[in-house]
């Protein structure tokens, strides 16, 4: 019975899929040499706040919101003592502002009480903070600390990975697991930025520009 409850090991990808993934990575690097985190920040604390705000919101909107927010609450200690009504008014335009305000204050208090006001540098410590899941933790670890603990999977990354035949999964955690097998660890943070850049510039969900796509030779979904 114990054996029947064991999780089945993931099927290893074929050599062809691995080779195609590496070719795609090379093409993306050439096409988007400046791909980077779109959330404007100067410190790990600022990136953590911005990433929490980015849930169900565009990076552009977050970047319009955070300058005033960071000026009002420059440190985790300041945010921990925030008046929730004032905080809500500052972040209202990002959507779901009541829940986000609650999470931001809870996160800041946890940083102050448990980490001396500093953002921790481990997946385990980040994920127990209010408002922080694996996706947010990956963003912070990869972009604030240069730690490739995993791959950030947003809607662009998931959608394009499926179009490229790199995964068939729809669950972000499963997509991440599949990509981590195909992409070298040193490129785990970068691949998200590359795929997001590609999704915004060329592989647009409603009107993909396959004729202009540098990935067409390696994309099974290409119409070219």
Image: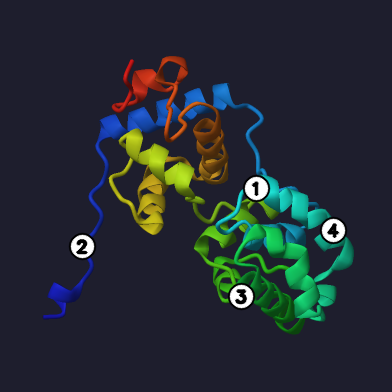
Residue 221 drawn at (x, y percent): 30, 28
User: Going 75% across and 48% down the picture, which residue do you hit?
Assistant: 40
Callouts 2 and 1 close, C-beta under 8 Å: no
Q: Tell me the residue that label 2 is attached to.
A: 8
User: Going 85% across and 68% down the picture, which residue do you hit?
Assistant: 73
| Other-residue count near label 3 (Cα within 10 Å), few / some / many at <14 / 14–19 / ≥20 | some
N-terminal label among 4 and 2: 2
Q: Nearer the viewer, mark 3 or mark 1?
A: 1
Q: Nearer the viewer, mark 3 or mark 4?
A: 4
User: Going 88% across and 61% down the picture, which residue do you hit?
Assistant: 71
Q: Tell me the residue that label 1 is attached to.
A: 59
Q: Tell me the residue that label 3 is attached to.
A: 129
Callouts 3 and 4 close, C-beta under 8 Å: no
14 w.r.t. 185: above or below: above
N-terminal label among 4 and 1: 1
Circle 3 — which element?
loop
- Give the CA separation, mark 3 to mark 4: 23 Å
Callouts 4 and 2 close, C-beta under 8 Å: no
- Give the CA separation, mark 4 to mark 1: 15 Å
Residue 6 drawn at (x, y percent): 20, 71
Would residue 107 be visible to someone looking at this image?
yes
Q: Tell me the residue that label 4 is attached to.
A: 68
Callouts 3 and 2 close, C-beta under 8 Å: no
Circle 4 — which element?
helix
- Give the CA separation, mark 4 to mark 2: 49 Å
Residue 43 drawn at (x, y percent): 79, 57
Q: Nearer the viewer, mark 4 or mark 2?
A: 4
N-terminal label among 3 and 2: 2
In the picture, measured across the screen, residue 75 lies left or right of residue 166, that is right
């Amino acid at each position: 019975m114990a054996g029947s409850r064991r999780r089945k090991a993931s099927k290893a990808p074929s050599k062809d899929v691995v080779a195609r993934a590496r070719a795609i990575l090379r093409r993306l690097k050439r096409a988007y040499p400046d791909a980077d985190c779109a959330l404007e920040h100067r410190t790990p604390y600022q990136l953590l706040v911005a990433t929490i705000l980015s849930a169900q919101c565009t990076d552009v909107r977050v970047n319009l919101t955070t300058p005033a927010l960071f000026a009002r609450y420059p440190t985790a200690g300041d945010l921990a003592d925030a008046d929730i009504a004032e905080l809500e008014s500052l972040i209202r335009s990002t959507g779901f502002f009541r829940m986000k305000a609650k999470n931001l204050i809870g996160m800041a208090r946890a940083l102050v009480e448990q980490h001396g006001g500093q953002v921790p540098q481990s997946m385990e410590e980040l994920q127990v903070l209010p408002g922080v899941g694996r996706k947010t933790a990956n963003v912070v670890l990869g972009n604030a600390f240069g730690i490739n603990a995993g791959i950030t999977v947003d809607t662009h990354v998931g959608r394009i990975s499926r179009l490229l035949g790199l995964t068939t999964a729809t669950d972000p955690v499963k997509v991440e697991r599949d990509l981590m097998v195909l992409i070298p660890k040193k490129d785990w943070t970068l691949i998200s930025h590359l795929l997001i850049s590609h999704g915004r510039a060329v592989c647009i969900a409603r009107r993909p520009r396959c004729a202009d796509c540098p990935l067409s030779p390696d994309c099974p979904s290409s119409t070219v």
